Image (tube, rainbow, N blue to C red):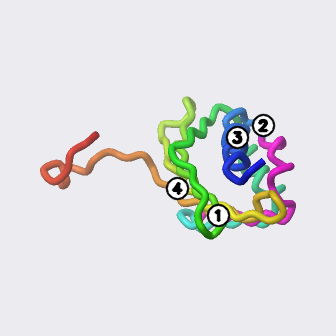
Amino acid sequence: MDKIEIVNTLWETFSKADYRSTESILHCDLKVVWPTSREFYDSREMFIAVNEAFGDGWRFDVQVIEETLSDRVISVVFVSSPDCNDSFFATSIFDFENGVIINIETYWAFKDKQPEWRKALSTVY
C-alpha cells in the first residue's frame, strides 16, 4: 500500500468504528498531537483507546489528501456524527516509518456559521 492508500484506509476504517483494525497501519510507538486542545497520545494503544471512547457513528469524509515533497501526507477530513450537534474539519499531517504511520498532527476546526460582523464583507457558500 502506498502512503495515500494507508491514510485513506485509516479514515475508511474509522468511519466503520473498527479502530482495532488500524493497528497494522499504525506504528506501535505512534505519536499523535492535537495542538488545538493541547493533547498528546504517545502510543498506538492510547490513540485507538481515545477513538474507541468516542464510540461509533462517526463519519470521516476525506475532502483532500495529498503526498508532499517531504514524503508526508496531508489530509483534510470532514468529521460528523448523527449523535453530535457539532461537526468538524480535521487537517492531519502524517509521517511514516517502514510503511506505517508513526506521527500524526491534527488540527481540529468546528464547522461554524458566519459571524454577524462579517455578513457585509463575505459571501456564504
Neighbour class for label 4 at 10 Å: few (<14), some, many (≥20)?
many
Label 2 to label 4, Cα distance in Å? 21 Å
Question: Is residue 27 covered in magenta?
Answer: yes
Res. 98 image quadrant: bottom right
Residue 26, compared with residue 40, is above or below; it is above
Label 2 to label 3, Cα distance in Å? 6 Å
Q: 5 or 28: which is nearer to us?
A: 5
Would residue 41 be seen by someone viewing this image from the given angle?
no
Q: Position of residue 26 (x, y in %)?
A: 80, 55
Q: Residue at x 61, y 61 (%)?
A: 93
Apparent side of residue 87 relative to residue 58 in the rendered image (left or right): left
Which of the marked residues, 4 or 3, is nearer the chain's N terminus?
3
Find out whether the residues at labels 2 and 4 contact each other: C-beta distance under 8 Å: no
Report the span colored magenta.
Answer: 19-34
Residue named by callout 3: 14
| Callout 4 secondary element | strand
Q: Position of residue 57 (x, y in %)?
A: 64, 31
| Three-letter code, disc 1 | Arg
Q: Residue at x 45, y 50 (%)?
A: 110
